Image: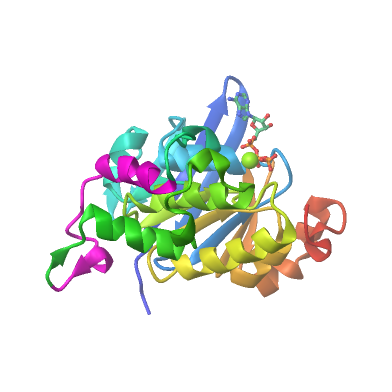
Amino acid sequence: MNTQAVLDARQVSKHYGRFLAVDNVNLRVMPHTIHAVIGPNGAGKTTLFHSLTGTVPITQGSIVVNGRDVSRLPAHKRVQHGIARSFQVTSLFPELSVRENLRIAAQGTVPRQALRFWTLPTGPLSHAERIDDVLERMGLTATQHMTAGTLAHGQQRRLEIAMALIAQPQIVFLDEPTSGMGVDDIDAMKQLIHGLKSLCTVVLIEHNMGIVMDISDTITVMQQGRVLVEGPPDAIRNNDKVRQAYLGNMITGGQA
Ligand SMILES: Nc1ncnc2c1ncn2[C@@H]1O[C@H](COP(=O)(O)OP(=O)(O)OP(=O)(O)O)[C@@H](O)[C@H]1O
Ligand SMILES: [Mg+2]
């Protein structure tokens, strides 16, 4: 099968001054997969995300989404090409309800005809229907009238992802969605991320190896700004270079 990549980043580099944080990275992400980016602290994962989503300009390379070159577009323009990333907690409105947060996020988005999965036989989903759908997907329906600032940490992290999903992205970028979570919340988040595959493509930075190994289709391992190795979970789990990169038992030991 010759499926086209939904995201094709070629020879992407990002300098901070003289420091090369992302060094000639190639990343091909196939549609409706979960593609994890892992690697030790400081490997350049977040910088790669910033580069792909347009938060920082790249120094070199090209980024193609669905065949369109977005390399030079600012972040808000890339959203229109189907890229979204999970919001930080600070971008929630803590004094507003969960539903109101999503309504505000929805108002900033333009429905895209091309995104068939949001389209009913009778026409595109209304904002209210999109909000209902996202609330249900992220397990937040019961909390929709609660004030966002009063949510438990795990629920806030789910709301951040819900805010990104409202933009109807083809690709959603999640940077450590389980950080700071307890065991129960982590397991719920794992199931929810896995469920996103039917809706869109997920690019995931995650230090919890249990999650990465359980739900990823492809894993790209970064070290010192470069891609060290890429493959399916089984190949990565047993790769000596990866073990050495982590200098320890992270791969077999779960949480980083
Ligand atoms: N704005 C910046 N200016 C200068 N250097 C930066 C900047 N942002 C990141 N770096 C450096 O780039 C390197 C990669 O950082 P990055 O945050 O991308 O790593 P990471 O893989 O996401 O790490 P972690 O797992 O700890 O989140 C680090 O050495 C970091 O200090
Ligand atoms: Mg990071």
* Residue 252 picture quarter: bottom right
Counting every numbered tag in the picture gives 0
Residue 61: image location, x then y, percent: 43, 40
Horizontal arrangement in the rendering, residue 140 relative to residue 68 (left or right): right
Residue closer to the observer: 47 or 107: 107
Give the magenta range: 98-121
> Could you tell me which residue is drawn at 32 percent across and 36 percent down?
76
Q: Is residue 244 magenta?
A: no
Quarter holding residue 225: top right
Extreme front residue here? 145
242 sits left or right of 3 in the view: right
Q: Indicate yes or no whether the magenta region holds residue 103.
A: yes
Q: Can residue 190 be seen at all in this image of the molecule? A: yes
Question: Left of 230 or right of it: where is 166?
Answer: left
Q: Residue furthest right?
A: 248
In the figure, 54 relative to 32: above or below? above
In the image, residue 55 above or below residue 25: above
Question: Is residue 29 something that shows in the picture?
Answer: no
Q: Position of residue 184 (x, y in %)?
A: 70, 63
Q: Residue furthest left?
A: 122
Residue 78, given in percent of the width and then of the height, sits at 32, 41
Give the residue drawn at x 35%, y 72%.
Answer: 3
| Left/right of residue 173 with respect to residue 200 in the rendered view | right
| Viewer-nearest residue: 55 or 145 | 145
Tell which quarter ligand 1 is in.
Answer: top right
User: Percent position (x, y) of residue 42?
Assistant: 70, 38
Residue 234's place in the image compared with 41, above or below, is below
At x 19%, y 70%, the residue is: 120
